Image: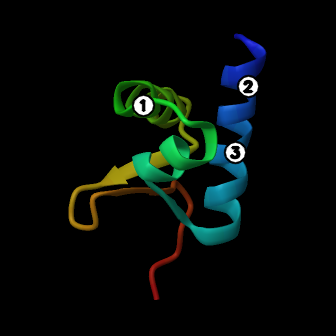
Amino acid sequence: MTWAKQQRQEFIRETVNNFGVIGRADLMIKFGIKEACATRDLGEAAKRGVISYNPKTKCYEAKNAVVV
């Protein structure tokens, strides 16, 4: 894994830990990457079980998020 990809994966973990959700736009704005790259990074994090996609909100959420 490249340094840049590691930085993006760490940002995904930190963001979902702090806010509970993350979207493609968050990665695109923070790192200046294209939509396809952001989608791929989020997909990899979802495969590792860090996040899961919620089609209702169209965002990725922390896997252990508690809905209140």
Amino acid type for the residue under numbered disc 3: Phe
- Give how far across and how far down residue 65 sits, in percent: 54, 67
Query: Disc 2 marks which amino acid?
Result: Gln
**Distance CA(mark 2)–CA(mark 1):** 14 Å
Q: Residue 3 carries which label?
A: none
Q: Nearer the viewer, residue 52 or 58?
A: 58
Work out how far the residue at label 2 is from the one at label 3, CA to CA, in angstroms.
9 Å
Q: Which residue lies furthest to the bottom in this view?
A: 68
Residue 47, position as x, y percentages in the image: 47, 29
- Of the numbered discs 2 and 1, the one sitting upstream in the chain is 2
Classify 50 as above or below 59: above
SS at mark 1? helix
Secondary structure of the residue carrying numbered label 3: helix
Circle nearer the N terminus (3, 1):
3
Residue 45, placed above or below residue 40: below
The amino acid type found where label 1 is placed reads: Gly
Q: Name the residue under label 1.
A: 43
- Name the residue beneath numbered marker 3: 11
Q: Is residue 61 left or right of residue 19?
A: left
Q: Which mark is residue 6?
A: 2
